[in-house]
Image: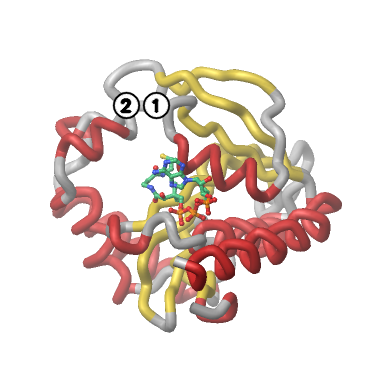
Amino acid sequence: MHINDIQVRGFSSSDIAGFLEYWYDSDPAFLRSLGVNPAKLPQRKKMREMLELDMERQGRDGNRNSALLAIALQGTTVGVHELTHLAPRTGGNGLSFESGIMHAHIWRPENRGQGIALVSYVRAMQEYFRRFGLDAVLFESPIHNPAANGVKSKLGIGASGEGRMHWPLLDGPVRTLRYRVTPGELPAIEQRMRRAWTELRHRVEEC
Ligand SMILES: CC(C)(COP(=O)(O)OP(=O)(O)OC[C@H]1O[C@@H](n2cnc3c(N)ncnc32)[C@H](O)[C@@H]1OP(=O)(O)O)[C@@H](O)C(=O)NCCC(=O)NCCS
């Protein structure tokens, strides 16, 4: 696998089926391991309609303001990044935000643990800074999610403290590690990503 095989691009209508499969056809035990209560998800049809509406709106706006990005491996979408809790800039024009919380979901287990997120996190942050003029991208990663925290650690992003998520889809409050990345930190993060990627490829080739 080459680093350029991993791309982050606008989420499109053809990505909706994979998105729905992940949330509605995954093993409920997997969703619960993320803290999600499957019974609290909106109906599948409702979720499809919301995504279709978003795509329609994005089509009109030239796909500039969507908070959903597709993670592609050799051209095939394998997951998404999402930005939630966008905090509008005081006195702004409604298109610029101070911060947002970024999420990552690689849909199939066989695509996880290969370094895809290592690359896609950096690409997605670059795109979110560009799209929303953010001062910072925030992360709230469940403390008991080694992969989500492992990616940050490999990118050299240190946690700023602990938090608690109380989101409607969750079974209950989830303890998190908080992270904050500013645009000025991205070049160093990208360098660390490239180093970690090279080390990972060497390790894979040795196996
Ligand atoms: C979290 C997630 C996006 C990470 O993506 P990924 O491509 O699998 O991550 P990477 O392969 O880049 O892993 C980076 C590091 O994380 C750590 N890591 C990954 N999977 C791990 C696991 N199952 N257990 C422990 N550490 C793990 C490792 O330190 C890894 O570094 P390594 O290359 O030295 O092994 C992905 O695993 C995923 O989508 N999981 C399901 C949804 C989810 O948990 N989303 C996040 C929060 S809700």
Tell me the residue at 72%/44% (across/down).
156
From the viewer's side, name the closer residue of 21 and 128.
Answer: 21
Secondary structure, mark 2, is: loop
Q: What residue would you read off at disc 2?
A: 170
Q: CA distance from mark 2 to mark 1?
A: 6 Å
In the image, is 88 to the left or to the right of 16? right
Q: Mark 2 and mark 1 in contact? Answer it, CB < 8 Å.
A: yes
Q: Position of residue 42 (x, y in %)?
A: 21, 41
Q: Quadrant of residue 108?
A: bottom left
Q: Position of residue 77 (x, y in %)?
A: 37, 72
Q: Is residue 120 visible?
A: yes
Tell me the residue at 22%/67% (across/down).
17
Q: Quadrant of residue 38?
A: top left
From the viewer's side, name the closer residue of 83 and 194.
Answer: 194
Q: Position of residue 147 (x, y in %)?
A: 46, 43
Q: Is residue 9 visible?
A: no
Which numbered disc covers residue 167? 1
Q: Quadrant of residue 28?
A: top left
In the image, is 38 to the left or to the right of 180? left
Tell me the residue at 51%/57% (across/down).
117
Q: Is residue 96 above or below residue 66?
A: above
Amino acid carrying label 2: it is Leu
> CB of residue at label 1: within 8 Å of ligand 1?
no
Q: Total label count?
A: 2
Secondary structure, mark 1, is: loop
